[in-house]
Amino acid sequence: MSAEEPSSPSRAWVLHVDLDQFLAAVEVRRRPELAGLPLVVGGDGNPRRPRQVVATASYEARAFGVRSGVPLAAALRRCPDCVFLPHDRPAYDAASEEVMIVLRSFPVTVEVWGWDEAFVGVHTDDPRRVAEQLRAAVLERTGLSCAVGIGDTRLVAKTATRSAKPGGIAALTRRQWFDALRAAPVTEIWGIGNRIAARLADLGVHTVEQLARADTDMLAAAFGPRIGPSLKVMGLGGDNSPIVDEPRIAKGRSMETTFTEDLTDPDRIVAEVDTLARLVAESVIADGRSVTHVAVKARTRTFFTRTKIAKLPMPTTDPGEVARMAGVVLRRFPDDVIGRPIRLLGVRVELAAPTSTEMPTDPNG
């Protein structure tokens, strides 16, 4: 990836703005005495309460091997001097909105992708100058630092950001894509995880270059007519669809619970799934959305995880119908899953596309 800014007269560029250690940074902003300390945000902030995980760790905590997803108890063992704080969603919502307001104060298009990141579309002959202006404005007006990746697609810009963090600027173009990633495993591509990588490996596709050169028909046969060809496009650096400023519409929503003690009572398992289904249904119906599919996830004591899903006969806005279907899905699990001690249950609903009269959901949804 290049530290030199790409140049082309007034062409379209994508800037990926990624806030540094966002949740931890928000906590430090309101408690400056925490600056420079190893800091962990997650759960209720009590590392001695079982089955809670790290949401974000400060860079100082990461030096001890504390990362997102690590159990809080393990974080405490790795870094006994860590400061543990509870997850505070309203504070992070508010801080994120501050940042997006700053970005929208520039003559650019802002596409929000979550609390801590957004893609910015701009026509300019000097994208690095724009990146520097955005970064400086965010820091000055919010006290939060960010890294900015410059590219000509979302995927290329997001990839460039890896070299920019923390707090820097890096550029990468599709022309440079193969020089940077030719021999890299396909998991280096944003959006390709271990499961897809394993299926690609079965096809003899292991590297970014191999994916870019893969036969489209082969990929379509293995992954379907939509996903298969899109994987090849990702191998080539992603599509160049324009940045849009509409809120990202959630296609689904989920809720899950990790239990302090494993569940072994079948009636309790049924009751917990029913409660989760009603809660998640009520949350999306309050946003004016209707439910089309219901999925149930179960994780056993040994971390074996299984998910099953079913389509409703017709879209519904009735939490009772969603709960009924969740019960139907739960009964489809084999005994070797539900018959074991259960540490986690979750319910996810998939949503019908909003009509013109429905309000978009929160971009973090």
Image (cartoon, rainbow, N blue to C red):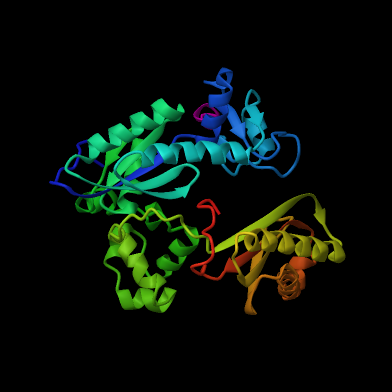
Region of the chain picked out in magenta, as a range: 58-64
Q: Quadrant of residue 318?
A: bottom right
Identified at 43% across, 73% down, the residue is 223
Which residue is at the front of the view, 365 or 60?
A: 365
Identified at 69% across, 36% down, the residue is 73
Q: Quadrant of residue 172?
A: top left
Q: Residue furthest front?
A: 357
Q: Residue furthest top?
A: 33
- Residue 48: x and y in percent read 75, 34
Q: Is residue 350 visible?
A: yes
Considering only vertical position in the picture, is 359 above or below 104? below
Identified at 31% across, 64% down, the residue is 233
Identified at 39% across, 77% down, the residue is 225
Which residue is at the front of the view, 52 or 78?
A: 52
- Residue 222: x and y in percent read 42, 76
Question: Does residue 161 appear to the left or right of 25 in the view shown?
Answer: left
Question: Does residue 33 appear to the left or right of 271 in the view shown?
Answer: left
